[in-house]
Image (tube, coloured by chain):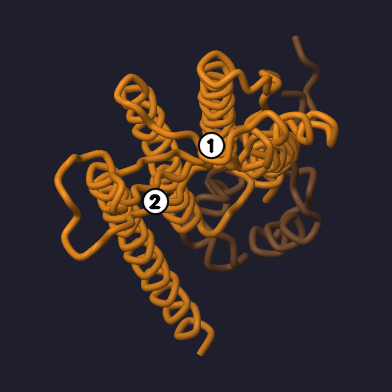
Chain colours: A orange, B brown
Amino acid sequence: MIEKIKDWMVWAETYLLWGMIIVLVGLSVIFIWEGINDFRTFNQIMQDEPITGLDESEIKKINLSFTRIETESGRYRYASVRNLVYHKSQDEIAATLQQADADSPIAGISSSPSFLINEQHTDFWRTQFILRLVLHYGGLILLCIFFGIFGYLNLKQDNKLLTREVEQLLGASFFLAFMGWIGYYMLNRWTIRFLNSEFNLAESTAALGPNEIFFTMLGLMLAYSLIAKAVPVQEEQDLTV
Amino acid sequence: MAIIVNLDVMLAKRKMSLTELSEKVDLTISNLSILKTGKAKAIRFSTLEAICEALDCQPGDILEFREDE
């Protein structure tokens, strides 16, 4: 009876692993498809040809939104930046509003200001978009791959969690999350420098990477340090007969 | 290692194979190999008791202390 239960558990674990791998592959395909879709939408926004059946197309990803509006007076494109941290004081806002014309766009008052995209700025926004897209979806796909490897290792090593391989995998995940955080930090800083020079935004350049990645990084570091301490204990335990 | 495991000696004396012992003491062959080759870091009293019972010997017949040179 016990043997049968053990056999059944081995089968269940194998199917669970295959199920997990299928889900992770499915998720990776969805992320790739979403990335390609976002890239197509971005190209639609940037192209000069009219968009069939649409007078407005918007993409909201990675702290940047791109919008194209077709009106009778012309075609406008603008980029919205959602993660600016600097807020102007009430006095500054009042002064800006007093000086502004009714027709001119006012940049930098709210936390998600929008900036009209002209010919000179197109290359900058395109590069920003592509790099952020690669970082965003690339990170998600890598996460799927790491979960897959983790599941495989876990099954291969009789569901043992505290092994050298898992420790190395967590170490590699931490390194990747750290690189992602640095990547976002650099991109945010670049955006803010660009906005400051082109739109006189006076935004602080002490931009940080996204909090989600920062806390993921902290969690991974904590898990890594715990497993690094526990692995030698587990190894000793394994050599106790 | 100051503690020497003489399991192979006792197995030879009793003319018993490792597989036979593993069946009698309900331990895997790989775990018994770890013990036999001196790679084990520790041994449980329950394991020692089972081995002694299976080989009809005393703990001192299996374990021996030898000073490091």
Q: Image height check: is A158 above or below A221?
A: below
Q: Residues within 10 Å of mark 2 (few under 14, many from 20)?
A: some
List the residue tagged with mark 2. A59
Count of numbered tags: 2
Nearest the eye: B54 or A179: A179
Q: Which mark is residue B42?
A: none
Element marked by disc 2: strand
Q: Residue at x 43, y 81 (%)?
A: A8
Circle nearer the viewer, 2 or 1: 1
Quarter where residue A90 is shown: top right
**Residue A98 image position (x, y, % from top left):** 72, 33
Q: Position of residue A93 (x, y in %)?
A: 76, 34
Q: Considering depth in this image, is B58 or A24 the residue closer to the camera? A: A24
Q: How would you rate the neighbour count of disc 1 (Cα within 10 Å): few for under 14, some for 14-19, many for 20 or more?
A: few
Quadrant location of residue A119? Answer: top left
- Residue A46 position in % (x across, y down): 26, 39
Host chain of mark 1: A
As shown in the figure, which amino acid type bears the numbered disc 1? Pro
Q: Chain of mark 2?
A: A
Q: Residue at image x 52%, y 24%?
A: A191
Residue A49 image offset from top left, x and y in percent? 14, 45
> Where is A68 relative to A185, above or below?
below
Q: Is residue A49 visible?
A: yes
State whether discs 2 and 1 lie on one chain: yes
Which residue is rendered at x = 56% and y = 54% of the image? Answer: B14
Sequence-first disc among 2 and 1: 2
Q: Separation of disc 2 and disc 1 at Cα?
A: 21 Å
* Residue at image mark 1: A105
Amino acid on which the number 2 mark rests in the picture? Ile
